[in-house]
Image (cartoon, grey):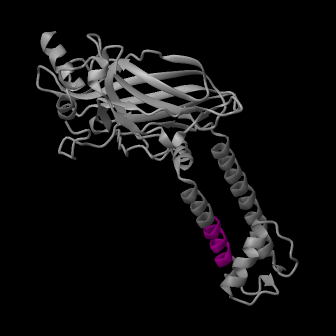
Amino acid sequence: MANKPPPSEHQYARFMAPQGKRPPRRVALIRGQDKSRFTDFYHLVLTWPWSVFIAVLALVFGAINAIFALAYIAQPGSILHARSGNFWDAFIFSAQTIGSINYSVMAPHTPYANGLVIFESFIGFVYLGLMMSIMFARFSRPTARVVFSNVAIIAPFDGVPTLMFRTANQRGNQILEAEITMTLARTATTREGLVMRRFQDLEPVRRRTSLFALSWTIMHRIDETSPLYGLTRDDMLNGNMEIVILLGGTDETLSDRIYARHSYLPEDIHWDHRFVDILTMHPSGRRIVDLGRIHETTPLDLAAVGFTDGETERALEDEGASG
C-alpha cells in the first residue's frame, strides 16, 4: 500500500494551524455586539508579523507628520528658516518636533506654530508610549521553540498498533513539567441528520514529563478504548479527521508558561513506518539531537515484529471486525 495517498476531495483546511503559522481565519459576528473594541485591536496588533507591525508603525508615523505639515503650511511664515508653503520643509520640521531632535535650524515663528508644536509634542509622547508598550509586549511574550515531526506514524509497538509522533526542544534548555494533550477532531452525523464537528480525547502512553530537554516520542495505543480503534486510512479521510496536539510547560529560562501546537491530517500519517534515530552520543559524553532528521521515517519490516498477515491497517480492520 502506498505510504501517502494522493490529494483528494477529502482534504480540508486544518482546524489547528501548526506552530509558527497564522491560524485559520474565523469570522464570528454577534448581532448587537460592538466589533471595534480597543482590546480586539490590541490583540490584532500583537498577532501581526514583525514586518507588518514595523510597516504600520512607519505609516502611522508618516501620516502624523504629514497631517502636522499641512497644518504648519496653512499659515505661511509660521516656521522660521523654512520655505513658505513648502510641504517637505514643514514635514521635516514636524519630524524633528515629534522626535525631539534639536537641530536648531527651523523653529516656530508665530503663536499659531508654537501652539501646534505643543500639541504635536503631546501627540508624540502618546505615540511613543503606545509604540514602546506594544513593542515590549511583543518582545516579552513567552514563546516556545518546539518542533514537531511533520508526519505521524501508525505501527506496531509491543504488539499493539500505536500512533506515534515526536517533538523536540530547539532551545536546548529544559521545559519543566511538560504536558501533552491529544484530541481527535472528526466530522460526525447525529441520528437526527445534523452534521457537526466532534472532539474526542486521545490518551497518550505518557502524558507528562518532568524535564523536557531533548526529544520526546509521544505514543497513543490504538486498543479497544481508543477512538481510532478499527479505523482505516479511508475512514479517517472520509471523516475529515484531524489529530490536534497541544504541548505546554514552564520554560526554565523565562520562568513562564509556554505552549506549542501542531496537527496531523490523515495524509500526514505514515502507516507501517518507524522514525529514524536522531539521538547520538558525543565523545565528550553529551547527547546530540539531530533535528534535521526529526521528520524522517523508514518502512517497517512487519514480519520481524510478528505482523505476518498484512499491514497495520489490515490488522486494525481485522480487530475492528472481530470487536
Q: Which residue occupies 23% across, 42% down?
A: 11
Front position in the image: 80 or 190? 190
Query: Bounds of the magenta span?
Result: 61-71
Residue 129, above or below 197: below
Q: Please tell me in which quadrant of the rendered image residue 24 appears.
A: top left
Position of the N terminus by quadrant: top left
Q: x%, y% of residue 276?
A: 44, 34
Q: x%, y% of residue 218?
A: 44, 23
Q: Is residue 202 magenta?
A: no
Position of the C terminus by quadrant: top left
Q: Which residue occupies 56% across, 59% down?
A: 51
Q: Label the magenta part by its dominant secondary structure.
A: helix
- Does residue 19 appear in this view? yes
Instruction: Give left or right: position of 102 versus 275.
Output: right
Front position in the image: 283 or 121? 283
Q: x%, y% of residue 103?
A: 86, 76
Residue 148, above or below 135: above
Q: x%, y% of residue 47?
A: 52, 47
